[in-house]
Image (cartoon, coloured by chain):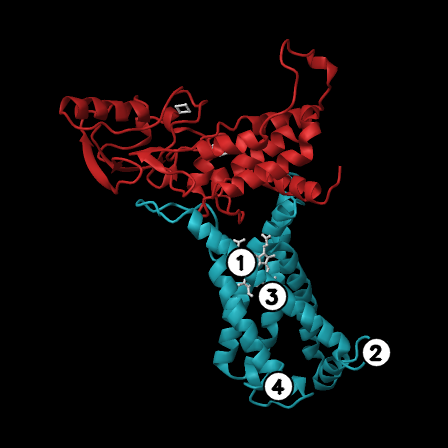
Amino acid sequence: MAVTGLLMLLFLIVHMLGNLKIFFGRTDFDHYAHWLRTIGNPVLHESWYLWIQRFVLVVAVVLHAVSAYQLSRRDLKARPTKYSHHQRAKAGYATHIMRYGGITLALFIVYHILDFTTLTLNRHGVDGAAYDNIVSSFSVWWVTAIYIAAMICLGLHIQHGFWSAAQTLGYNRPSRDRAFKGAATGLAVLLTVGFLIVPVSVLAGLVD
Amino acid sequence: MKLTLRIWRQAGPAEPGRMVAYEVPDANPDMSFLELLDVLNERLTLEGEDPVTFDHDCREGICGSCGVVINGQAHGPRALTTTCQLHVRSFSDGDVIDIEPWRSVAFGVLKDLMVDRSGLDRIIQAGGYISAPTGSAPEAHSTPVPKPIADSAFDNATCIGCGACVAACPNGSAMLFTSAKVAHLNSLPQGAPERASRVLNLVEAMDAEGFGGCTNTGECTNACPKGIPMDSIATLNREYLRASLGRK
Ligand code: HEM
Ligand code: SF4
Ligand code: FES
């Protein structure tokens, strides 16, 4: 869970930063989107790097989801009886919502790929015209609403997940605990805000 | 003080159970929580009813046998306090108090509030020990231990094996209990010979007992009467990785 989670997190940071290139305008952004297909050239053939990255990410998502499923099944089996007096949880909302947030993210990932990779659901849907494809989706308020909801789930997932991974991998120590918790919250806010700037700017008419 | 106790009654391991309400009209605020149950039981006995079964021994917070869930909290509302060390004055006149046994598949209810915690003993048998010659105690200064390590080992050694961590964990995981043994024994020179096998065997025994997996919710630490910290769990994971990778 921890290794695949951190792998996805690394991708998301790069992905978020790349998205911000949209503020440099259509030409710059479309050029960037095209460049992504040429990474590794000429050692690798056109788009090969992209396919390798896609393969690694799919493996990460699948392994993460399978471990989450197995862990959840084991945990539900270990504690089938609830207390009749409701337990007052100490854990925060982010910790509490990991499973449902994770499932929401899985559904979102499918939707997101249909929107911008396969362009199946995209209103503009022109291959290579990344900028216009993005603007066409986020001009619709409920598409932006879906992205807002999903990115809040993402932020919560990372807020617990990053610190939890530091525990799982044994990196956490009393002297580092505050730093890891702070980094988790920092990363969560950075990614949520960083990703959401784009759809919100489009909807607000700042990018068109 | 007048209190209403709603207590889980269950005649035996395979019997169905239910919450039953009892009035205790004459509770003294200075009683311990277990004395409150004693007072109720004396009355039930006089009335010819079956007294409430609950585990207890030392009544001074060191044996770990007295745990019950009080109003949804393992060992009740006071932090760092076992059920036996909790006083009735922590409640108010007229309160309704729910008392339930630890809930976890690995802890079967034996009767009423008493559960079978022998799973924790089997974890200890798998690795919660060191190999040392018996007989006269060795000279303490012959094996120097740095003060911070001695302190942290001692803190982890204060675990009383009560099982509150398992009871509080939404996953029924015994990770905090097990990690306290690893953080205690693996950090000391006396525990070094079994450093790798200890953590592997402890985790294997923990899994075999049907405890759940840890998702770092932190409910265990919160409930623990001895304040065993979450970083003991990070230590267990670190030791486990080290042992699995075969590093000495
Ligand atoms: C496919 C969709 C996803 C599902 C179903 C899912 C589900 C889960 C579940 C159930 C857990 C463990 C629960 C817990 O610790 O309380 C978890 C942990 C975690 N997730 Fe996800 N998640 C998904 C996507 C992601 C993504 C996109 C990231 C990238 C940032 C991520 C990062 C993490 C991390 C770092 C952990 C902590 C691992 C650990 O404690 O060892 N997850 N996830
Ligand atoms: S770790 Fe704390 S809660 Fe768990 S058994 Fe030990 S003393 Fe009890
Ligand atoms: S009776 Fe021994 S710890 Fe409570």
Could you classify mark 4 by the number of other residues whose Cα lies within 10 Å: few (under 14), some (14-19), or many (20 or more)? Answer: some
Report the residue marked by disc 3.
Answer: A61
* Disc 4 from disc 1: Cα separation: 33 Å
Q: Earlier in the sequence, mark 1 or mark 3?
A: 3
Labels 4, 2: one chain:
yes
Q: Horizontal and vertical percent for residue A172?
A: 65, 44
Kindly indicate which chain is depicted in cyan in the rendered structure: A
Sequence-earlier tag: 2 or 1 = 2
| Mark 3: C-beta under 8 Å from nearest atom of ligand 1 | yes
The residue singled out by tag 4 in the image is: A133
Whole-angstrom CA distance, mark 4 to mark 3, is 25 Å
Would you place residue B11 above or below residue B30 in this image?
A: below
Q: Quadrant of residue B12?
A: top left
Q: Dot 2 corresponds to which residue?
A: A41
x then y, percent, for residue B6: 24, 37
Indicate the quadrant of ligand 3 in the picture. top left
Q: Quadrant of the N terminus of chain B?
A: top left
Q: Amino acid at mark 2?
A: Asn
Kind of residue at badge 3: Val
Query: Where is mark 1, residue-wise?
Result: A68
At a point 53% along the width and 67% down the height, the residue shown is A105
Relative to A177, residue A185 above or below:
below
Determine the residue positioned at 66% across, 56% down: A3
- What amino acid is found at the position of numbered circle 4 in the picture? Asn
Report, in whole angstroms, how far the alpha carbon at label 1 lies from the one at label 3: 10 Å
Dot 3 or dot 2: first in sequence order is 2
